[in-house]
Image: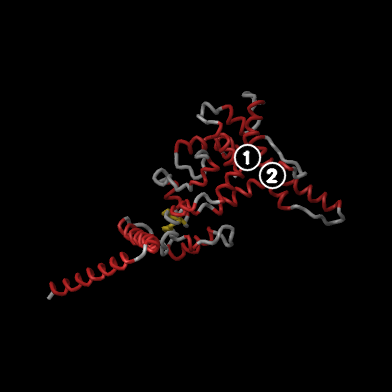
Amino acid sequence: KRSLFSGYFHFRRLTAMDALLGWYSALPLKKKLPASIFAAAVARVVLAWLMRKVQNRPPQPLTMPLIGNLYLLPQPGELPGVHKAMTKLSKKFGPVMGFWFGSTYTVVLSDWRAAHEALKVQGDAFAGRFCPPAINIITKGRGIALQNNLDEWRKARTALLRGMTMKRQGEKTVPIIIEEVQSTGKLWFDMVQANNGSADLKIRGHIGRESLNVYMRKMCNLRFSDALTETYEDVRVCLEQIFMRISAGNPADYIPILKLAGKPKVLDEMEHWTERMFKYISKWVQEHKASLDSDNPRDFLDEMLITQKENGLTDVDVEVIMWDVMA
């Protein structure tokens, strides 16, 4: 009986498979292509599910063909933001959660204990991370942002620690912060007082100038004036436009089949604004080189240039590290 029972179902499976293959063979060519793509996508989802079980991966939301879990995220710039969406998902799937950005698998940590375990206790094992190819337009594969080359990362990190982020450097920055806050407050007070208690203030522009000045003074001894000059406005716009493109991203970085559609507009725009921003950075570097006094470093950029050869930094490294500070 068992033999007859199993044979019956084996026959039914063969019959269904033959029918499916017959249906596929009868399709015209223009319908075979989308059918093949869909079948491959479904097979990939099933394979991913099996791999998750075999490799004991963490829980994850339902994965869709091609787009993965991207359907669960808000559009770029849409509130409440990706971090809020991830927090909401973590309440359902746990503090360690799998997530597919298109065809790219990611583990999302939403708990400080898990983050400490992964990034501190087992830091070397978890050092690698996905870097969307579009980001290399800005970083040129250097600096610390989404850096997978640990040697490059250590060079940039060492330079940043020595010149910007160590505790003693932070203590030196406090007076600069206070001075910039007071300067902006005094400017607003004078403008309101001069206009009988009211004024049309570009608050966002002045707050941006205040925070950017803190980094610029520490980094390359440059301060944008209260006048919101053309150079400051252009630098501010470059930063805003670059981050808008980073936020939008290049869908083909996560869904490779979209590369068949050609180069998207967002990459051309990212290249344009990055080139425009790095013209300023390159100019500041060249000006510092021309007036460099090795015995009297004025700022972080001077210190980088003095130890450039010793630390194995190229000019591109120096420029990208400056971008990391500004970003």
The dot on residue 234 is: 2
Q: Secondary structure at mark 2?
A: helix
**Tag 2: residue type?**
Asp
Crowding at dot 2, Cα within 10 Å, few <14 / some 14-19 / many 20+, comes out as some
> Position of 304 compared to 8: left or right?
right
Res. 59 in view: no
Q: Which mark is residue 171?
A: 1
Which quarter of the rendered picture does the N terminus lie within? Answer: bottom left
Is residue 196 among what the camera can see?
A: yes
The residue positioned 60% from the left and 37% from the top of the image is 169
Q: Residue at x 69, y 40 (%)?
A: 176
Colour convention of the picture: secondary structure
In the image, 262: left or right of 193? left
Of marks 1 and 2, which one's residue comes earlier in the chain?
A: 1
Task: Say the numbered circle drawn on residue 294.
Answer: none
Find the distance from the CA under tag 1 to the CA under tag 2.
30 Å
At 71% from the left and 45% from the top, the residue drawn is: 233
On the image, the x and y values in percent for residue 317 come to 54, 34
The kind of residue tagged 1 is Glu
Position in image of residue 78 (x %, y %): 58, 61
Up-down relation of residue 118 to residue 224 (above or below): below
Give the foreground label among 1 and 2: 2
